[in-house]
Image (spheres, rainbow, N blue to C red):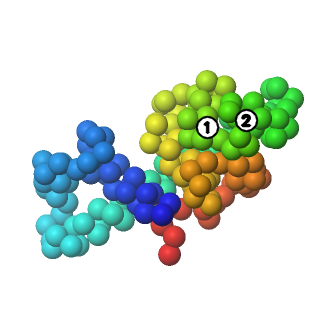
Amino acid sequence: TAHDSRLEWYWRREIDADESGSVSLKELIQFLEKAPVGSVEDTLEEGIRKARGQAREQMHLTMSRVRRRMIAGMKANKLTLERLFGQFDKDRDGTLSLREFNTALRRDLKLSRSDASAKDVAAVFALLDEDGTGSIDIDELKSLIRQPRSGKDSPARG
């Protein structure tokens, strides 16, 4: 599910130092050595809480940057969101794939890698893909522009 993938993303962000997509024994040991002395379970729980907090802040920041870029792109080109979406939808299937979304942000809206990493963009995409289809439709993109998504920026639901 999208929640599981977000949790995995947060966990990797905190422990997966080389961003290889997997946690080596060395990375796990380094993570545990940084943690205060206590039970392994307590240490892991604290690590998860810390990672969620940092990821929540990063997600909020990235969502704000993406939202600002979208709005600026609409204003600069005097386009409605629907027209801007149409420009981003290169295969004209009525949805944006992760590749189209990434291209739109990077090339068309000039979102730099220092503003948002590839992992950040993928996490925003997963959050916007509310129905879990692997693509974003116009209504899902509208929800980004319509409101700050303050409650939905939170990676931990429940």
Q: What residue type is labelled 1?
A: Phe
Residue for point 71% across, 40% down: 93
User: Is 74 on the left or on the right of 52, as rendered?
Assistant: right
Count every numbered label the image shows and give the total: 2
Q: What residue type is labelled 2?
A: Arg
Does the residue at mark 1 contact the one at mark 2 (Cβ under 8 Å)? no
Residue for point 35% across, 49% down: 13
Q: Is mark 1 on a helix, strand or loop?
A: helix
Pick the residue in front: 56 or 84. 84
Residue 52 in sight: no
User: Is 122 on the left or on the right of 29, as rendered?
Assistant: right
Relative to residue 83, is residue 107 depicted above or below?
Answer: above
Q: Disc 1 and disc 2: Cα gap in Å? A: 13 Å
Q: Is mark 2 on a helix, strand or loop?
A: loop
Q: x, y (%) of residue 131?
A: 62, 60
Relative to residue 93, is residue 49 depicted above or below?
Answer: below
Q: Where is mark 2, residue-wise?
A: 92
Q: x, y (%) of residue 98?
A: 56, 40
Residue 92 in sight: yes
Residue 143: quarter of image: bottom right
User: Is 58 on the left or on the right of 73, as rendered?
Assistant: left
Q: Where is mark 1, residue-wise?
A: 101
Relative to residue 155, is residue 142 depicted above or below?
Answer: above
Q: Which of marks 1 and 2 is nearer the N terminus?
A: 2
User: Is 140 on the left or on the right of 65, as rendered?
Assistant: right
Mark 1 packing: few (<14 Cα in 10 Å), some, or many (20+)? many
Pick the residue in front: 136 or 150. 136
Q: x, y (%) of residue 32?
A: 16, 58
Residue for point 56% across, 50% down: 134
Q: x, y (%) of residue 54?
A: 42, 54
